[in-house]
Image: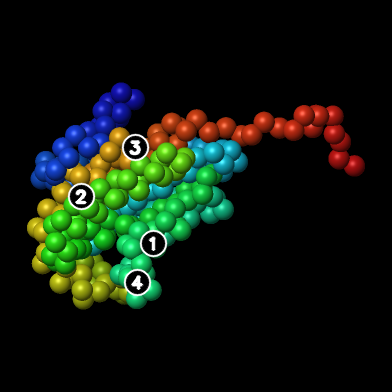
Amino acid sequence: MKDREKILGSLRLTGSTRNRIDLSKYKTDMTKGVAGKDVAREKLAEEVRKIDILQRKLYAEAKNGLLVVFQAMDTGGKDGVIRKVFGPLNPQGVTVASFKRPNPKELSHDYLWRIHPLVPARGMIRVFNRSHYEDVLVHQVHALLPESVLKERYRQINDFERYLGENGIAVIKFFLHISKEEQKSRLESRLKDPNKRWKFEPGDLAERKFWDKYQEAYSQVMGKCATPAAPWYVIPADNKWYRDLLVAEIIKARLEEFKPSYPAEQPGLDQLTVD
């Protein structure tokens, strides 16, 4: 148990750097602490069962909420991990929101305008497939905003996430870290498989040319926007089975911190009978 906690702790960023992190120090193919794919899948099923119990209590208690953010390079595995970890849960208490390029209406408002209405209510888990971080990452990679504006956005995002935490909504953020070689393999797989080709966009190849700039942008984002209240986790994601297990373990541990419990029953229920 302590070994697993140590491994998970090594992936957690809470703001000690404040400028940037060095992503090259984080292995994308790490499988430390798990004896193979079959063992990982068994452990994943066990963790998901525990998450399911915790989620039911969270929903019933309606005291806290959990916002889970997933960011990754293209093919990083956001859809897959969401399906494996959250798919088995009760959809009444777990929902997913995806963020694409802002539409004209969204662009007419401040960049967090489209985010806030989708923050989970107390008792709920909301999963963001991409997020408000797109409004920093893309602008940094393509130099669409001056550095002074980006600096303000880092501060605003930290303020926003702190505000959520102070109002009972915890924030936890995952960067699914894959190698450039693994991305190439997954893009080729999409092209070859008719069942996956619908996910392929020619724009993915164009963005791949900015790989190094995106790595630097993520290094900046995680360095500046990791806080104790809203940490980032760098998840080695070349091996999907290991990725899924790590995310499940971290989600379970965060839900346990809430110590959710079912509300007290109404007095006298043990005296009632159903005719």
Reading the image, the residue beneath label 1 is 113
CA separation in Å, label 4 and label 3 = 30 Å
In the picture, measured across the screen, residue 234 lies left or right of residue 45, that is left
Cα separation between marks 3 and 1: 22 Å
Using the rendered image of the protein, determine whether residue 268 is visible from the camera's viewpoint: yes
Kind of residue at badge 4: Ser
Q: Position of residue 91 (x, y in %)?
A: 53, 54
How packed mark 3 is, by other alpha carbons closer than 10 Å (few <14, some 14-19, many 20 or more), is: some
Percent position (x, y) of residue 21? 14, 43
Which residue is disc 4 drawn over?
A: 108
Tell whether label 1 touches label 3 (CB within 8 Å). Answer: no
Nearer-N-terminus badge (3/2): 2
Label 1 secondary element:
loop
How far apart, in angstroms, are the residues tagged by discs 3 and 2?
A: 16 Å
Q: Earlier in the sequence, mark 2 or mark 1?
A: 1
Circle 2 residue: 221
Dot 2 or dot 4, earlier in sequence: 4
Mark 2 and mark 1: Cα distance apart in space: 20 Å
Q: CA distance from mark 4 to mark 1?
A: 9 Å
Q: Which callout, 4 or 3, points to the residue nearer the camera?
A: 4
Q: Which residue is mark 3?
A: 229
